[in-house]
Image (cartoon, rainbow, N blue to C red):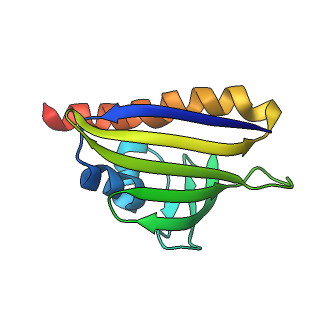
């Protein structure tokens, strides 16, 4: 099992970004795909037509989202923590994911950059135009 941590700068306020990560219609806009989401502790979600599935563990409006991502049968859950910090260019998004299965690590790493973060960046770049 491996862990991952990275920072991204998103050109949106923490409030806008939090809503983009927890509101079904907004997630559909930036992913361009089917989404099911119940943004409450214990509520489940599915994004990118089921490519990412899990449940919410903790929600602190406009500052922190903690999720468990499902990877089938594994002893320790994979926990994703998203922290949103104000930044002069928008929001600094801290992404931390623990207990990533070794065989999925490279794909997960690539997936954070593209399509996850790149789709968010495109969504906010288009809004500025």
Extreme residue in the left direction: 129
Above or below for 114 versus 48: above
Which residue: 65% across, 34% down?
108
Query: Count the marks: how many?
Result: 0
State whether residue 1 appears in this view. Answer: yes
In percent of width and height, residue 115 lies at: 49, 32
Which residue: 80% across, 55% down?
76
Q: Which residue is more in the foreground, 3 or 127?
A: 3
Above or below for 79 versus 60: above
Q: Quadrant of the C terminus?
A: top left
In percent of width and height, residue 64 lies at: 43, 57
In percent of width and height, residue 4 lies at: 63, 35
Which residue: 80% across, 39% down?
1
Instruction: Tell me if 108 is positioned left or right of 86 in this view.
Output: right
Instruction: Tell me if 37 is positioned left or right of 20 in this view.
Output: right
Among the 4 quarters of the image, the one containing residue 86: top left
State whether residue 50 appears in this view. Answer: no
Q: Which residue is more in the foreground, 116 or 18?
A: 18
């Amino acid at each position: 099992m491996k862990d991952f941590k990275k920072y991204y700068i998103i050109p949106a306020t923490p409030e806008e970004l939090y809503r983009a990560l927890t509101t079904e219609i907004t997630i559909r806009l930036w992913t361009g795909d089917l989404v099911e989401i119940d943004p409450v502790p214990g509520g489940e979600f599915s994004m990118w037509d089921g490519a990412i599935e899990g449940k919410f563990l903790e929600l602190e409006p406009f500052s922190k989202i903690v999720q468990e991502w499902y990877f089938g049968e594994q002893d320790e859950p994979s926990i994703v923590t998203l922290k949103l910090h104000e930044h002069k260019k928008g929001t600094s998004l801290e992404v931390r994911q623990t207990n990533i299965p070794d065989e999925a690590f490279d794909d997960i790493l690539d997936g954070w950059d593209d399509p996850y973060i790149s789709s968010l960046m495109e969504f906010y770049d288009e809004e500025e135009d």
